[in-house]
């Protein structure tokens, strides 16, 4: 079977992707694309990344059979890909490390990044500390408030956190502000984008760095049970942990891929962040994909209990996977995600991130409808330490 | 023949305002004032929720305009009414998503109907602009592309091939906003473009005083002033200082020997 080789050289996955950025950045993106192609063909780049992934990030992460969770659901066997055990607590480190090494290779010492939940900010801050680079993190004021612990962690690792007060004061506005910084300091600054969004080559590059998740998971499930899974379930914010686990399975046509979007207070309330399910094609932050927007083409404010999913866009490759039917996308509400969170805590002694909890509850319900021979892999994209006060609040508990 | 070319019979002065900021009535008043005071072209900004090429002044203006209920439809209607009052060319400046959402052909023919002469879309580089270029071509609209100090020679060629009306040179690597000083390498940048492009070259981003205008217009065919006009509209609700400011710019440009 032909290995899928997208994007094309203009950065398109079918009709999605491209480069919709100010002229100032176009030459920078050309350079970055060339530098990445060179790095990609250089074995020493990958061997250093492998080495640091092992010794710094703690890879490979385990594939864990959730026996109690499986028993609780009474159906398909559920395996958890334990990205929550990666250094800094989420899959975000895979991409931060890859791009950090690329930035060093290009010779840029000033790193900027956006963050929502703070996980990408923490991962970037850690990599910058380790590689000795300056690190500036843009974060919406609202997220600074609800993810205070991660803000403190970033500062401890030497990053400067710049709260963003524009617009909805969440991830989308942090990206705007990071892009403005980048346009201003294009010559000496590397933008370490945190998901499979943005202009080409970011969606491709971030996918490549995150696909270590799927490569490991594929080998691990073959080693454990001798066959591929029936389903892979992952939450979708910008779409990096999901693409990361989906990508190495794209040619395995019998493996169903399910992306779980944040349905917030319910799709019909309008207060959600389900770009693929409820959005339409548009351009946001440099690429064409599904976007939550109003009739006039203004980007909408979103809502999710999880800051990491609270984003009105989604990576272009997901648009392509949706349109071709290779992946399907579903929504899970705030309250369902909370249920997933508690379920995994009780059943397995694992505290998932609220983002990942969306995937957990969907997988648990799916498992219950399937017979016992079926296998589901859930990408447990991160751990929930950062979410304790939000969960306590939501459950009416005073800490 | 582009209507915009009229503007370049002398050093062109291009003013920018965000439609609906601070109010639609102000837009209806300020555009004729800009024309009377010496602007050759006015850029009407269609506000967008995520103006990532704009600095704080225009960000705030866009945000307020959106709160005032301004949509692309409202901007088209405003342009139509302004067309009855002013004769100078009007161009829309906006981001790509509102245009895409409207429909490229639909938007361009509505622009044509409203008397708009051109479009400036800072997040649409020529590589992504082919479809829109077809639509503008059918509707007598100039699609104006931008160049930046970082643009390479091959990119300058591409823009020189595609841009209609004029080429918008971004003076600095940065976002819009009034600045105290302009970069030193501006002359070299303009010269690099001049060697390749035949279109008039207009410089924008950061220009806020008559002195700067004069300095910049010596090497360019026109200058673009936005954030400073918006600031003055904020400071002086009578708009009198906007008129004074623009007359000052016009005078400075007219002092440049031809
Ligand atoms: C733990 C975790 N999961 C998922 C996400 C969502 O991002 P993506 O869809 O790019 O994986 C985030 C983002 O902050 C996160 O921290």
Image: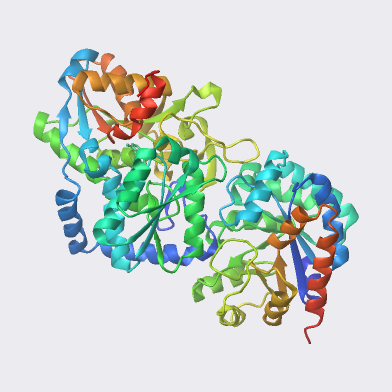
Q: Residue at x 63, y 70 (%)?
A: B180
Residue found farthest to the bottom? B257
- Where is residue A66, by image quadrant? top left
Judge whether A368 appears above or below A129 on screen: above
Judge whether A52 appears above or below A367 on screen: below
The x, y position of residue A388, in whole percent, is 33, 29
Residue found farthest to the front? A399
Judge whether A15 appears above or below A223 on screen: below
User: What count of labels does the image hold?
Assistant: 0
Q: How is the image coloured?
A: rainbow
The x, y position of residue B124, in whole percent, is 57, 57
Q: Is residue A329 left or right of residue A377?
A: right
- Where is residue B233, by image quadrant? bottom right
Q: Nearer the viewer, residue B86 or B174?
A: B174
- Where is residue B71, by image quadrant? top right
In this orientation, does residue B194 appear?
yes
Q: Quadrant of the C terminus of chain B?
A: bottom right
Q: In terms of image quarters, where does ligand 1 lie? A: top left
Judge whether B178 appears above or below A308 on screen: below
Q: Residue at x 47, y 30 (%)?
A: A277
Q: Quadrant of the N terminus of chain B?
A: bottom right
The x, y position of residue A219, in whole percent, is 14, 39
Q: Nearer the viewer, residue A139 or A14?
A: A139
Q: Is residue A292 left or right of residue B178?
A: left
In this orientation, does residue A19 appear?
no
The x, y position of residue A272, in whole percent, is 49, 29
Q: Nearer the viewer, residue A377 or A14?
A: A377
């Amino acid at each position: 079977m032909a290995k899928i080789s997208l994007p094309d050289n203009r950065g398109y996955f079918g009709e999605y992707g491209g480069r919709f950025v100010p002229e100032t950045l176009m030459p920078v993106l050309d350079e970055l694309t060339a530098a990445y192609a060179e790095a990609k063909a250089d074995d020493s780049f990958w061997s250093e990344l492998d080495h640091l992934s092992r010794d710094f990030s703690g890879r490979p992460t385990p594939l864990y059979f959730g026996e109690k969770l499986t028993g609780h659901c009474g159906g398909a066997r559920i395996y958890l890909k334990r990205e929550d055990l990666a250094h800094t607590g989420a899959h975000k480190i895979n991409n931060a490390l890859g791009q950090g090494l690329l930035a060093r290779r290009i010779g840029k010492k000033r790193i900027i990044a956006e963050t929502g939940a703070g996980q990408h900010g923490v991962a970037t801050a850690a990599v910058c500390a380790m590689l000795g680079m300056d690190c500036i993190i843009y974060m919406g004021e609202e997220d600074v408030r609800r993810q205070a612990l991660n803000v403190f962690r970033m500062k401890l690792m030497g990053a400067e956190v710049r709260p963003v007060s524009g617009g909805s004061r969440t991830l989308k506005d942090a990206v705007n502000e990071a892009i403005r910084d980048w346009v201003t300091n294009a010559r000496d600054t590397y933008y370490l984008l945190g998901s499979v969004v943005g202009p080409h080559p970011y969606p491709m590059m971030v996918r490549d760095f995150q696909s270590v998740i799927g490569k490991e998971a594929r080998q691990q499930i073959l080693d454990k049970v001798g066959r591929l899974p029936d389903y892979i379930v992952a939450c979708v914010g910008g779409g990096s942990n999901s693409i990361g686990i989906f990508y190495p399975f794209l040619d395995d046509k019998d493996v169903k891929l399910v992306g779980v979007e944040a349905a917030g207070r319910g799709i019909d309330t309008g207060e959600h962040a389900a770009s693929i399910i409820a959005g339409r094609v548009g351009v946001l932050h440099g690429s064409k994909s599904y976007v939550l927007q109003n009739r006039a083409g203004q980007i909408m404010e979103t809502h999710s209990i999880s800051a990491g999913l609270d984003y009105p866009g989604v990576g272009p490759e997901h648009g392509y996977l949706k349109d071709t039917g290779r992946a399907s996308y579903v929504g899970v509400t705030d309250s369902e995600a909370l249920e997933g969170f508690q379920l995994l805590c009780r059943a397995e002694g694992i505290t998932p991130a609220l983002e990942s909890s969306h995937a957990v509850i969907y997988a648990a319900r799916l498992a219950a409808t399937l017979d016992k021979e079926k296998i589901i892999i859930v990408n447990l994209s991160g751990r929930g330490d950062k979410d304790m006060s939000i969960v306590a609040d939501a459950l009416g508990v005073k800490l | 023949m582009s209507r915009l070319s009229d503007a370049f019979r002398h050093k062109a002065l291009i003013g920018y305002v965000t439609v609906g900021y601070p109010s639609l009535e102000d837009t209806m008043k300020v555009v004729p004032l800009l024309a009377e005071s010496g602007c050759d072209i006015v850029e009407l900004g269609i506000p967008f929720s995520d103006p990532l090429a704009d600095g704080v002044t225009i960000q705030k203006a866009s945000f307020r305009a959106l709160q005032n209920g301004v949509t692309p439809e409202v901007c088209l209607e405003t342009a139509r009414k302004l067309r009855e009052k002013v004769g100078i060319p009007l161009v829309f400046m906006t981001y790509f998503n509102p245009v895409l959402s409207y429909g490229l052909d639909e938007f361009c023919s509505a622009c044509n109907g409203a008397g708009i002469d051109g479009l400036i879309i800072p997040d649409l580089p020529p590589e992504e602009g082919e479809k829109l270029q077809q639509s503008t071509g059918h509707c007598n609209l100039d699609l104006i592309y931008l160049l930046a100090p970082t643009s390479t020679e091959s990119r300058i060629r591409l823009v020189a091939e595609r841009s209609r009306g004029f080429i918008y040179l971004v003076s600095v690597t940065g976002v819009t906003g009034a600045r105290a000083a302009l970069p030193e390498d501006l002359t070299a940048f303009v010269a690099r473009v001049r060697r390749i492009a035949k279109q008039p070259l207009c410089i924008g981003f950061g220009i806020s005083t008559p002195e700067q205008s004069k300095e910049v217009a010596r090497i360019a065919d026109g200058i673009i002033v936005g954030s400073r006009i918006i600031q003055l509209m904020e400071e002086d609700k009578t708009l009198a200082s906007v008129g004074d400011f623009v007359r000052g710019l016009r005078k400075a440009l007219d002092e440049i020997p031809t």
